[in-house]
Structure formats: C-alpha cells, structure tokens
C-alpha cells in the first residue's frame, strides 16, 4: 500500500498538525500566558485551544487540498511559516499589516542585517526540510470525484463539530479572551503574514490611481526682517528616549552635544507609530496619529512640500531605507557606498552616518554662495538593529563588552545594550558635527538644527526585541523617542526667541504631531495649514510677520 503512496488525508492531517504544534508557537504561547493569569479557567478549557486551532486550520487548508496545488502551496507556507515563526519567537515580532509594509520597504542592506547563521539553520530545519519531505512523499489521491468530495465533507464536518462542541460550553470564555486580546489573530500563522502580506502587496504594487491632493501652494516665507536661513532637520532611526541621560538614563549617551551651547533636549516624545514606514509619513503629514490614513497621506502634500512651496531650497539625503515617500517631490539622494567621497566610511553592512555629514558640508557651501534660504533633511541609519555593532566605527564605541553579531539571542542583555548605546553615542557625534558645520555660517545666515527619531526599540524588555509591535500593545520603549535642537545666536536673534522659555519647554511631553506645525512655524512658513496651537516654539518667540497674509 505504501508503494502506492499515503492517502491524501493522512498527509493533509500531518501538515495541519505541523502548523498547529510547530509553526504557531507565538499564538499558542500568548494564549496560554493569558490563561496562566486567570484564576477562573478550568483545566478542561485549557486543553481546548490546540483542538480549536487544529480544526480551524483544517477548514482553511481544505480549500487547497487538491492534487495539483497542495504540495507546492503547502511547501511554500511551511518555509515562510518557519521564517515567520523564527522572528516571532526570537524577537516578539507581530506580522501585521504595518510590519508587512515595513518588510516590503526594507532595502537589501537592511534586510541583510536580519540574516544570521541561526536564522538560516532554523528555517532550513523547520521549513526547508519538511517542505522537501512533503514534495518527495508520494500521495494517493481519490480516483473518483464524488469519493474525494465525500472525504472532504467528512473532514469538514468533523472540524466544524469539534469547534461547535468546544464553543457550546466555552463560547463566553473564548469571546472574552478574543475581545480583550485581539492581537491574537495577528499572531495566527499562516493567516497573519498571508492576509496582511496580500494587503501590503496590493497597496504597494497594485493600488488604484488616486488623485494627488496638492495643497499649501500659497505658502511663503514670512520673515521680512531676517537674514536667510540654513536649517538642518535630522530624522533619527530607532533611537529610544529611555536611553538618554536627560531622560533619566544612568549613562551619558550624549557626550558630544553636552558640550554645546544653545542646545535643547526635550522630554520623551510620543511617536506616530512603531516602524519607519508609518511614523515618518505620519509625522510629516497634516493628519497626525489619530487621523492617519496611509493612502491619504501618501497622496497629499506633506511638510517637505509646503517648505518647498514657500520658497526654500529643500534637499533630502538618506543613509537609511528611504524617505517612505515624503521626499518624492523634492531634491533627494540615497547615499551609496560606491561614492568615492565616502571612502573608508562604508563596509559590507552599509555606510556610517558620517557620509551624511560629508554631503551636508558640500551642500552648505553651495547654498551659502547662493545666499538662499535652505532646509536640508538628513535621514540617518542611527540605531537600526539587530546589527547595532555595525552602526558605529570602533573608535567611537565607549561601552563594552558588545554584541558583535546579528544573533541577539547569543548575546547577553548587557552586550546588547552596550552595542545599542554605542549607536546613540555615535549619533550624538554626528549631531555635534552638523552643529559645527552650521556655526561656520551663523554670521550671514540664521542657522539651526533639529533632531527627532522615528520610533524606539525594545532591547529584551518583556521578551521583546527590535520594533514594529502594534501600537496598541507596544511598550513605551518603542513609542517614546528623543528630540533635540540647536539654535545659533543669529537664529535666536532673528526669531526673537526667549531661550530661557525654550528651556522650560524641554520639560513638556510633546508628540510627533507637533513636529509638522513646529517646523512650519520656526521656518516662518506662512500658510493656512499651520496650527499655532501645535507649535512648541511659538510660545517662546515673536513672529514678526509681514502685513500681508498670503502672496
């Protein structure tokens, strides 16, 4: 009988069992952790979750239990499911829509940071080998159509009866757990990455053409009594507020900017999201976090556009994974390791953020000759993990021992934190270099620098690593970021800024929703899309507007 192959339903049930027992560790672990915290859950109920999951997967997989699609489709799900299971278990990653968008937006250099020996071995053992076995096993399919239909109906009936039999006595318990823990469905494999992956791919590559909402074209620079400005906005990456001494951290991760005058260090700032693909478009948008809609934001003017419409020369230089659409209509450049200007600043893991300083130095010289007000955005790679060790050169590392690989599970928490803190020190060094360059022009220009990170990072707290956890359940480490600013004497004078007042503003907990309006305000962009109530600079300065309200 074995020479003729195994009956299809035997192989089918083995695949369902494999997904239930092996590739759904995240949702099962989470479910049982919820049960452990409840004192009124019966022992009988605690036996039912695997049966419910097994039955639910049985019903879904039945749609693919046909001769010419079963092996290929299930093999694909097993390999991808193993990869998802690895990152879910190791880093606590939730593969929801935002995470799938983040994956699609990841560039090759960034993706390489997640590939390690342990991940490859894990995926090979739990994904590739089982998939190959499935492809090689001989399956005996029903020769008669109605027999095959009958077998599937029996399997479907048994699965439904099992779910109903469990639901009758325990429906209220399951409903309560589901209502209070809706994240569980985002942990269910392969539903999570297949469904949300489909949505993300559809949105990114097959979305319908939407008319672009161009607004703010009436904007203009309203500073008739000021000299031209050179202003640099640094968009940080994965820096969390918890690891900065001015927010109560025991270590000094800002040794370079601590020596600077006219430097502001704000209290923790609440983010729009926990991943770059959400937080960057969100904080550059008019909508803000509560009204954020991806399609609306991507098809509307944003902060960079309004600054450009007003008359500034605007540039975006990127050493990270791209600007997520916010720089599409301004001069922009993703810096490359092949650029001869960056010799010695790049390696197999990408370029250090000093390449941005080099490009900034070149751009400032050009803009100074033009005597033109300019805003220059620098998007740093900052503290992007898990390759923290690769984000700063050895001569800028001050905390040891460090985790020197991508396999965070092989490192102690001390080593991981040391490697991460070194990235913050290096970012601080970059900011000090930016300030130093700007000081060269403060006589003839009003110069300033503003820094804000996109989102934070988990470093093992609550068993979580990296970022991208759904906002509703994400820890504060992922949702609170640092914000800093330098304002030159010339800038302070031109804008009539009370710096002591700004020092008091440091103590207020702002959010990234303030970023859009605060940048428009401090850059004197006169537009009806500016909300003075969200400008944290306005209270401490006098805006000497012209007598006209629009061009």
Image: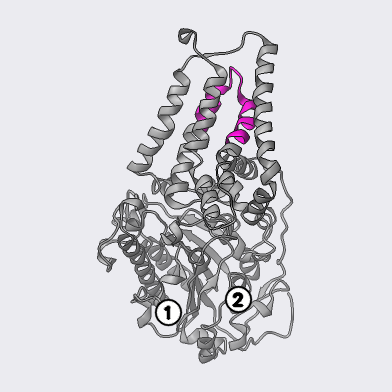
Q: Main secondary structure of the magenta part?
A: helix
The answer to whether residue 469 is above or below residue 189 is below
Residue 63 part of the magenta segment: yes
Marks counted in the figure total 2
- Quadrant in which the C terminus appears: bottom right
In the foreground, 528 or 7: 7
Q: Position of residue 161 (x, y in %)?
A: 68, 32
Q: Quadrant of the rendered structure where residue 302 is?
A: bottom right
The residue lying toward the viewer, choosing from 484 and 356, is 484
> At which x and y percent is residue 441?
43, 79
Horizontally, residue 471 falls left or right of residue 85, namely: right
Foreground: 86 or 536?
86
What residue does disc 1 label? 246
Q: Kindly state the secondary structure of the residue where label 2 is placed.
A: helix
Residue 120 appears in which quarter of the rendering? top left
Seen at 31% across and 51% down, the residue is 410
What are the residue bounds of the magenta stretch? 54-77
Q: Which residue is mark 2?
A: 518
Q: Is residue 180 left or right of residue 18?
A: right
Mark yes or no: residue 520 visible.
Answer: yes
x and y, in percent, of residue 192 in the image: 58, 43
Q: Is residue 246 magenta?
A: no
Q: Residue at x 55, y 81 (%)?
A: 508
Residue 94 showing in the rendered view: no
Separation of residues labelled 1 and 2 (CA atoms): 22 Å
In the image, which disc is placed on residue 409? Answer: none
Residue in view at x 49 percent, y 37 percent: 21
Measuring from the top left, give residue 461's x and y in whole percent: 43, 62
């Amino acid at each position: 009988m074995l020479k003729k192959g195994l009956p299809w339903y035997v192989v089918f049930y083995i695949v369902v069992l494999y997904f239930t027992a092996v590739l759904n560790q995240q949702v099962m672990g989470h479910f049982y952790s919820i049960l452990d915290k409840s004192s009124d859950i019966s022992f009988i109920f605690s036996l039912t979750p695997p049966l419910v999951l097994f039955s639910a997967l049985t019903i879904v997989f039945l749609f693919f239990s046909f001769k010419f699609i079963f092996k290929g489709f299930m093999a694909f799900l097993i390999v991808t499911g193993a990869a998802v299971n690895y990152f879910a278990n190791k880093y606590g990653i939730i593969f929801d829509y935002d995470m799938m968008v983040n994956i699609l937006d990841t560039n090759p250099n960034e993706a390489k940071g997640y590939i390690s020996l342990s991940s490859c071995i894990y995926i090979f053992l739990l994904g590739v080998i089982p998939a190959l076995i499935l492809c090689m096993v001989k399956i005996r399919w029903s020769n008669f159509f109605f027999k095959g239909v009958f077998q599937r109906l029996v399997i479907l009936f048994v699965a439904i009866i099992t779910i109903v039999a469990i639901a009758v006595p325990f429906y209220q318990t399951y409903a309560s757990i589901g209502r209070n823990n809706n994240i569980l469905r985002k942990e269910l494999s392969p539903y999570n990455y297949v469904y949300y992956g489909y949505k993300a791919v559809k949105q990114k590559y097959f979305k319908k053409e939407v008319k672009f909402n161009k607004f703010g074209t009436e904007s203009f620079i309203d500073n008739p009594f000021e000299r031209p400005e050179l202003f640099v906005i640094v968009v940080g990456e994965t820096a969390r507020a918890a690891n900065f001494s001015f927010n109560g951290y025991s270590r000094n991760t800002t040794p370079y900017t601590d020596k600077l005058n006219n430097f502001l260090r704000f209290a923790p700032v609440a983010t729009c999201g926990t991943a770059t693909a959400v937080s960057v478009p969100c904080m550059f948008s008019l909508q803000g976090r509560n009204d954020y809609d991806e399609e609306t934001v991507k098809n509307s003017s944003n902060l960079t556009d309004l600054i450009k419409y007003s008359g500034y020369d605007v540039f975006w230089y990127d050493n990270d994974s791209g600007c997520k659409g916010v720089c599409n209509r301004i001069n922009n450049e993703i810096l490359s390791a092949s650029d001869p200007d960056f010799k010695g600043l790049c390696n197999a893991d990408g370029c250090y953020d000093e390449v941005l300083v080099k490009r900034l130095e070149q751009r400032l010289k050009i803009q100074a000759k033009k005597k033109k007000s300019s805003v220059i955005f620098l998007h740093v790679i900052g503290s992007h993990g898990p390759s923290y060790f690769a984000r700063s050169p050895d001569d800028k590392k001050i905390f040891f021992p460090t985790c020197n690989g991508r396999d965070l599970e092989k490192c102690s928490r001390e080593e991981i934190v040391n490697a991460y803190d070194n990235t913050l020190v290096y970012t601080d060094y970059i900011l000090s270099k930016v300030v130093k360059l700007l000081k060269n022009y403060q006589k003839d220009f009003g110069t300033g620098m503003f820094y804000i990170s996109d989102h934070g990072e988990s470093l093992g707290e609550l068993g979580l690593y990296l970022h991208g956890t759904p906002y509703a359940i994400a820890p504060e480490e992922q949702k609170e970021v640092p914000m800093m600013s330098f304002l030159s004497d010339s800038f302070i004078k031109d804008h009539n800024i009370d710096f002591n007042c700004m020092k008091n503003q440091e103590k207020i907990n702002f959010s990234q929703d303030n970023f859009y309006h605060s940048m428009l305000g401090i850059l004197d962009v006169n537009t009806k899309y500016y909300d003075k109530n969200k400008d944290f600079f306005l209270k401490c300065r006098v805006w000497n507007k012209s007598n006209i309200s629009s061009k």
